[in-house]
Amino acid sequence: MAIHTMTTLKSTIEDLATEFAMSIIGALRSASIDELTAVSGTGGATARRPGRPPAAEGGGASALRAGRRGRLGRLPRRSASDIGKLVESIVSLLQTHPEGLRSEQIRAELNLRKNELPRPLSDGLTAGLLTKKGEKRATTYYAGKGGSKAAAGKPERASKKRGRRAKR
């Protein structure tokens, strides 16, 4: 008798599942495209690859910063004037700290990501707007003695590696 009840239960479940599936298919066939996109959540948006964050509204580095947490990620392309403005803000910050600041302190004060700072520091040093003492993590940056704010726009970038190779 137990076998007879199991087959009855199994066939009842199969019948209910088939009936349910057929009613879902019927509902989908009678729905409009607008209803289907509203239910699926795409809302007519273009498909994007899995794992990629949605495009930040408003653009800019701050929108990117807010959208990405954790790993650093690639920076958007910055213009020479954007980098020049950042150099100027670094110089003005260092003028208020005559004892100098390390790069992580500058980054914390200006609310920047780790990978946003090397280029402006390098350009500021090249233009003479910044000076430094120490090496690696012990490097302390100071406001430079010479240079003008106009030089911060796009300084000439000297390659240290080329100079070393030429000496050999």
Image (cartoon, rainbow, N blue to C red):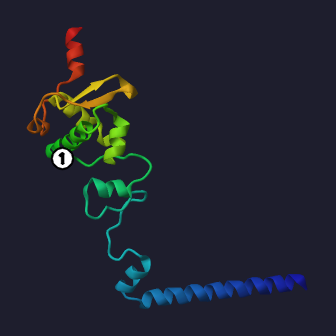
Q: Residue at x 8, y 38 (%)?
A: 150
Q: Residue at x 38, y 74 (%)?
A: 42
Q: Position of residue 26 (x, y in %)?
A: 49, 90
Q: Quadrant of residue 118?
A: top left
Q: Position of residue 76 (x, y in %)?
A: 26, 49
The answer to whether 107 is drawn above or below residue 147 in the figure is: below
Q: How many marks?
A: 1
Query: Along the line of sight, which residue is nearer the eye, 45 or 87?
Result: 87
Which quadrant is the C terminus positioned in? top left
Q: Position of residue 59 (x, y in %)?
A: 25, 59
Q: Residue at x 38, y 79 (%)?
A: 37
Query: Along the line of sight, which residue is nearer the eye, 28 or 103?
Result: 103
| Label 1 CA crowd tier, 10 Å (few <14, some 14–19, many 20+) | few
Which quadrant is the N terminus positioned in? bottom right
Q: Position of residue 56 (x, y in %)?
A: 31, 61
Q: Is residue 10 left or right of residue 137?
A: right
The answer to whether 138 is drawn above or below residue 18 in the figure is: above
Any part of residue 101 in sight: yes
Q: Which residue is mark 1?
A: 82
Q: Quadrant of residue 138?
A: top left
The answer to whether 44 is drawn above or below residue 66 in the figure is: below
In the displayed orientation, state which residue is furthest to the top: 168
Q: Quadrant of residue 60?
A: bottom left
The secondary element bearing badge 1 is classed as: helix
**Amino acid bearing label 1:** Asp
Q: Residue at x 13, y 33 (%)?
A: 155
Any part of residue 113 in sight: no
Q: Is residue 22 left or right of residue 15?
A: left
